[in-house]
Each structure stands twice: as structure tokens, then as C-alpha cells.
Image (spheres, coloured by chain):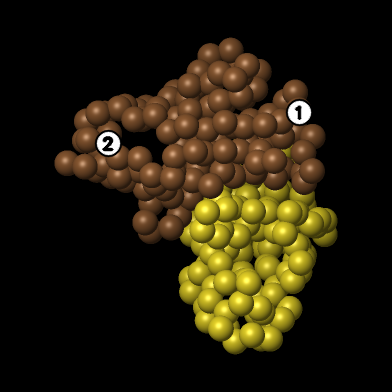
Chain colours: A brown, B yellow
Amino acid sequence: AQKITQTQPGMFVQEKEAVTLDCTYDTSDPSYGLFWYKQPSSGEMIFLIYQGSYDQQNATEGRYSLNFQKARKSANLVISASQLGDSAMYFCAMREVYGTSYGKLTFGQGTILTVHP
Amino acid sequence: NAGVTQTPKFQVLKTGQSMTLQCAQDMNHEYMSWYRQDPGMGLRLIHYSVGAGITDQGEVPNGYNVSRSTTEDFPLRLLSAAPSQTSVYFCASSSTLPGLAVQETQYFGPGTRLLVL
């Protein structure tokens, strides 16, 4: 079974609008972390935002916020006021404290976001 | 700080050839790891290290060797390259051991694009 599922292969958004990228996860570990990374066309992996399983509030980092619904096991990324530079591949990832490989990040398949002017 | 550096950026190999992908970090990070990225599969963990002299296998270790003789360097060796190893390889590091700080993000290098003919 997939541990991290990103069901949107591609998303389109108009510049200055908000967009939500979906991520659902599967774990029985009581302690875990959820991450979002951005991969622009240049190829590097850029850390965006983190949410811990015990965090009471949703994480925010500038225009990025994470809509964490623990009971539903979802960790959607919300980008407000989209910019042309937001066009990229976005990965959701999870780290489990008691996972199969120490420190392993499990990644979803990614969502390609295209921002139109 | 240069962060995480990887060389080469791009490499073409013939089937059966061996090579070493270099990874170095100057942040005194204990934890280092290698991932490969393939289309539609996100990133998958190959090997990881929790400190000098200590390495272990990740999700897809077959065909790869690693060693960690210093804190700074974590080379990945392809013993006998196969077309199935055509991929983009990322090295990553983090300062604390993940089990102690699940929120600690991993910093990724720029990647090495490998083509095996």
C-alpha cells in the first residue's frame, strides 16, 4: 500500500489565486513528520514546510500553509497568492520515528503545478 | 557554507561500468542519505548513514555500495551499471539523528543525472 498518495498529477492555477495540493498518508506510527518539498525545473529539492503529528496548529511559512487533518490522514499544501515562480513539481513526504529505515523520508509521486499569468 | 554538494552533475555510463557519485556536506551533519528519483515514483531511499563508519540499507540498495569514512563525505558506488540505474540521484543530510528530532528537515544536494546505456 502507498504510504504517501498525491492524487493530482497536474494542477493549474491563475496567478494571484490560491491553490491546494492534496496529500494523504498511511502510518501506524504514533509519531511522524510531514514535509512538503518544491522541485523547480532546475532540479533541486527545496524544503517548504513541516508539520509534526503532535502539533496542534497547522503549520504556516509565508504563503505556504499546511492543512493538517489527522483523523483523515491528510496534509494538504495551500499556496496563497500564486506566483509564476511557483510553477514546479511539489512532493509530499513523511518521516516515521519507528519506520523501516531510520530517518527515511517516504515521498509521494508528486504534483506538477503550473501557474498561468 | 556550500551546503550539500554533489559531483558530477551529469554522467553517461555503459552497461557494466562502475563509477562513484560523490557527496559532501560542510554543515557537520551526522545523518546522510542517498535517494534516487524516477518518474512517477517520487524519491526512494538507497542507503543512509548515521555517522562516520556506520551505514545501512534503505529501500532500494541492490547494485549500490556506500561507505562513510568521514563526517563530511558519503560516496555512492555503482558496482556494475545497468540501464535500470538510469535515474537522478540525490544526496541529503540533516544535523540531528531523525529519531530524536523527527521535524529535522533534510537538506538536499543539487542531484546527479545518470544515464546508463
Q: Is residue A41 above or below residue A62?
A: below
Visible residue check, residue B9: yes
Dots 1, 2 in contact, CB < 8 A: no
| Amino acid marked by disc 2 | Val
How far across and down, in percent of the image, does residue B85 sit? 63, 71
Instruction: Give B37 or B104, whichever is nearer the viewer.
Output: B37
> Which residue is tagged 2?
A13
On screen, residue B57 versus residue A48, left or right, reads right
Q: Residue B75 at x, y = what percent?
A: 68, 67
Task: Chain letter for mark 1, please.
Answer: A
Q: SS of the residue at dot 1?
A: loop
Q: Is residue A6 above or below residue B14?
A: above
Residue A107: image quadrant is top right
Mark 1 or 2: in front is: 2
Q: Quick check: B101 left or right of B8?
A: right
Q: Are marks 1 and 2 on the same chain?
A: yes
Residue B109 position in % (x across, y down): 53, 57
Q: What is the CA distance from the residue labelled 1 to the residue labelled 2?
A: 35 Å
Q: Which mark is residue A29?
A: 1
Give the total of numbered labels.
2
Q: Residue at x 22, y 35 (%)?
A: A14
Is the residue B104 above or below the residue A41 in the image?
above
Which chain is indicated by disc 2? A
